[in-house]
Image (cartoon, grey):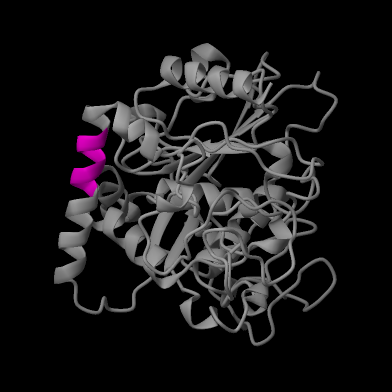
Amino acid sequence: MGQTIFVLKKRMCKIILLFICQAAFYFPGLTQRSCGTSAPSPDELMKNPALRSLYDSMTAKYRSWLSTQLQRPTAVRVFPVVVHILYNNNTGDATNISDAQVFSQIDIINNDFQKLNADWTNTPAAWQGLVANCEIKFCLASKDPNGNYTNGIVRRYTDSTNFVLKPSPKHNNTGGSDAWPTDKYINIWIAPNLNNGVTNRLGYASFPWENDGVEDGIVIRHNAFGNTGTAASPYDEGRTLTHEVGHFFGLRHIWGDDQTMADRCSGSDGVDDTPNQLVSTGGCPGFPLTDSCTNANPGIMFMNYMDYTNDACMYMFTNDQKTLMDFYIITAPNRQVLLNNVNNSCGNCTLTLNLSGNSPGGGAFYKAAVINSTQNVSLGGTLLYKAGTTIRLQPGFRCINGRTLYAGMEVCYPPN
C-alpha cells in the first residue's frame, strides 16, 4: 500500500509541475502532518540531470555569496500581503473566515519571523543560541493594484469545495481568485479543502527559484490558518503558514526530503546549523529525541518550523536558516522585486491608528503605538490599547467603518 501511494504521488507531481514546490499535509485532527511532494530529493536530482544542474548551481551560488557576506545591518524587511479567501457555503464549515482570523495569522507570522513568539524560550539550552530573529515583517496591503485603499483581504465565493491542482485556487476561471501582482504582494489563498485523492493537505508554497509568475504564492486550508475561528487542533496556532513562508523564502524541510534514499542520512536541507535527521517528526515528542542520523544528544531539532511537529511544538528558526532566507530575498529576482516594491502597497502609517467620529464597535487597537483621534477615547471597554500607548488629537483622519483593525497592518485613511 505504501509503495502504491508513493507511485501515485510521483505521478501527480509530474503532471502538476516541472519543479516540485509544495508541502502537503493530513487533515487537522490526525496525529501527524504528511508531505506528498516538496523540494527535489537526492533521488530525484540523480534521475533528472537538468534539475540537478539547476539545484547545484543554486547551492554553489549560495556558498559563494555566503563567503563574501559581512555582518548584515539590523533592519526589518517588510513584505505586503494580500489574503484571498475562497469560501463555499456547502462545505459544512465556516469557510468564509473572519477578518479577525486573518489578523491573528498575520500577528503569528510577524512574531515567529521576529523572534517575538513567547514559546521560543522552550528551545533546549543546547540550541537557544541558534534561535534567529529573521527580521522579516508582514503587513496586510493598504492599497490594491489600482491604488485604492484596502484592508488586504479579498473574498470570493467559489463553487469548488476542494482544490486538487496547485494552480486552481489562483485563477478566477478555475473557481479561485486571480493573484494581485506577484512582484508587489505576497499572495496567500485560503481554500476550503486541499485533497489530491491521496492526502489532505494543510498547505503548499512556491520556492523562490521557481518561475511561477501569476501563480507565485502560498495556499493554506482555512482550518489551519490563524489561531481563532475555524482553526482546528493540532494545527491551530498558525504555524502552517510559518512553515510555508519558510518554503517561500527558500527553506527546505529540515530532514532534507530524502525519504527514498538508501542512505537517508546523506540528505541535507542545505543549512549548516540544523542537525542531520533521518525522517520527518510528528506529534509533540519529548526532548531529547534521537535517530540513526543523530544518535547522541542533543538529537533531532524537532521544534524547528521546517519539521512536521504539531503547531504547539514548533517555535524556532536557526541563524543559518535566516541567512539562507536572506540569500533568496537579496538574490532571487522574484523575491528581491517584492522587497523593492514594498512602499507601493504597505502605506506609510506604520503602527499608527487614525480615528475620527464614531469608532467601529468591538475594535481591537492594542497594537497601536500612537492613536490620532478627534474624539474622546476611553481605555478599556470595546477599545483595547497596549500599555503606554500615546493618545493625541489630530483632525481630518478616519478609520474604515465596521472593520476590526490592527494599526500595525498599515491601515490608515486620509481625509475624504
For the stretch drawn in magenta, the main secondary structure is helix
> Is residue 31 positioned above or below 193 on the image?
below
Residue 90 is situated, as x and y percent measured from the top left of the image, at 81, 18
Residue 26 drawn above or below residue 350:
above
Residue closest to the eye, 354 or 211? 211
Q: Please give the name of the residue rendered at 64% of the width and 53% of the height, measured from the top-left corner.
A: 281
Report the magenta residues as a range: 52-58
> From this viewpoint, is residue 146 visible?
no
How many numbered marks have been drawn onto this rendered protein structure?
0
Residue 250: give x, y in percent of width and height.
37, 50
Residue 218 left/right relative to 335? right
Residue 283 in view (yes/no): yes
Reply above or below: 6 against 407.
Answer: above
Q: Residue at x 65, y 26 (%)?
A: 2
The answer to whether 108 is drawn above or below residue 386 in the figure is above
Q: Could you tell me residue 194's position as x and y percent?
A: 64, 27
**Position of the N terminus by quadrant:** top right
Residue 226: say if magenta: no
- Give residue 222's quadrant in the image: top right
In the figure, is residue 231 to the left or right of 241? right
Q: Is residue 58 left or right of residue 97?
A: left
* Image position, residue 23 (x, y; %): 53, 38
| Residue lying furthest bottom | 388
Left or right: residue 91 compared with residue 306 = right
